[in-house]
């Protein structure tokens, strides 16, 4: 019997050590280490501040109406950071991004080879009538004929997609 004791003690010691390590882990509030967190969606106060900082006329935009207008885009586009491409490409960070530039999305030849950067003015024309703005593109969307809806959806997108005021 006695001869067994030291062996089982040797066997138990590492288990006790693991137990202690786990307990220590449980007590320290975990901070996610390494990998950067995706930027969180802005809160209401932050949204209001972002809106107020936009260049005219977008600073007068109605974000609720913009969100409503964006309901017409949602079936094809996500706007969250790293969100999936659907029928259309993810729109996070679209302002200041070259047209047709996401590697993982299969753009039309027209958009892939278009040589411009998205800003509010370009987006306004695109949304007014995608077909005439860039012939040969494959966004089958009739357009937003109402200028106020376009202003508001652009303001909404600027607030939601990480636009920084250095871009137009
Ligand atoms: C029926 C699906 C559909 C709807 C609805 C739609 N889109 Fe698109 N969108 C697309 C497709 C498809 C493309 C890619 C076009 C191409 O490659 O020619 C696109 C491209 C875009 C681009 C260019 C992105 C880039 O990376 O260059 C923007 C900006 C955009 N859409 C905004 C909108 C907005 C804003 C709305 C709503 C007002 C909207 N779209 C509604 C399908 C849609």
Image: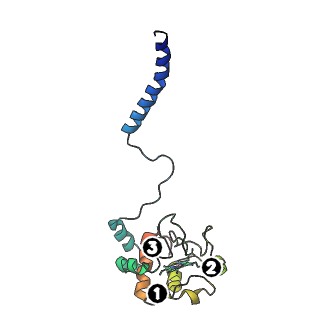
Residue closest to the eye, 87 or 137? 87
Marks 1 and 3, how far apart in space?
A: 17 Å
Is 106 situated left or right of 1 in this image? right
* Residue marked by disc 1: 144
- In the rendered image, the vertical position of residue 11 relative to residue 71, given as above or below: above
Residue situated furthest left in the rendering: 45
Cβ atoms under marks 2 and 3 closer than 8 Å: no
Q: Earlier in the sequence, mark 1 or mark 3?
A: 1
Percent of width and height locating residue 166: 49, 70
Q: Secondary structure at mark 3?
A: helix
Q: Is mark 1 within 8 Å of ligand 1?
A: yes
Find residue 158 and name its label.
Answer: 3
Q: Is mark 2 within 8 Å of ligand 1?
A: yes
Residue situated furthest top in the rendering: 2
Q: Secondary structure at mark 1?
A: loop
Cβ atoms under marks 1 and 2 closer than 8 Å: no
Q: Residue at x 36, y 37 (%)?
A: 27
Q: Earlier in the sequence, mark 2 or mark 3?
A: 2
Is 106 situated left or right of 56 in this image? right
Percent of width and height locating residue 26: 38, 38
- In the rendered image, the vertical position of residue 108 relative to residue 166, given as above or below: below
Tell me which image quadrant ligand 1 sits in.
Answer: bottom right
Find residue 111 and name its label.
Answer: 2
Percent of width and height locating residue 93: 51, 69
């Amino acid at each position: 019997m006695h001869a067994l004791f030291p062996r089982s003690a040797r066997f138990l010691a590492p288990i006790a050590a693991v137990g202690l390590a786990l307990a220590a882990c449980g007590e320290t509030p975990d901070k996610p280490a390494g990998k950067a967190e995706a930027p969180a969606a802005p809160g209401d106060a932050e949204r209001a501040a972002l809106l107020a900082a936009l260049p005219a006329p977008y600073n007068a935009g109605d974000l609720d109406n913009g969100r409503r207008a964006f309901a017409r885009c949602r079936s094809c586009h996500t706007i969250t950071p790293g969100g999936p491409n659907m029928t259309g490409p993810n729109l996070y960070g679209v302002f200041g991004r070259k047209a047709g530039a996401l590697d993982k999305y299969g753009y039309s030849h027209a958009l892939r080879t278009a040589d411009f950067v998205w800003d509010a003015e370009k987006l306004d024309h695109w949304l007014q009538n995608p077909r005439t703005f860039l012939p040969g593109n494959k966004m089958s969307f009739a357009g937003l004929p109402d200028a106020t809806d376009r202003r508001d959806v652009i303001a909404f997108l600027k607030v939601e997609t990480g636009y920084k005021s250095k871009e137009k």
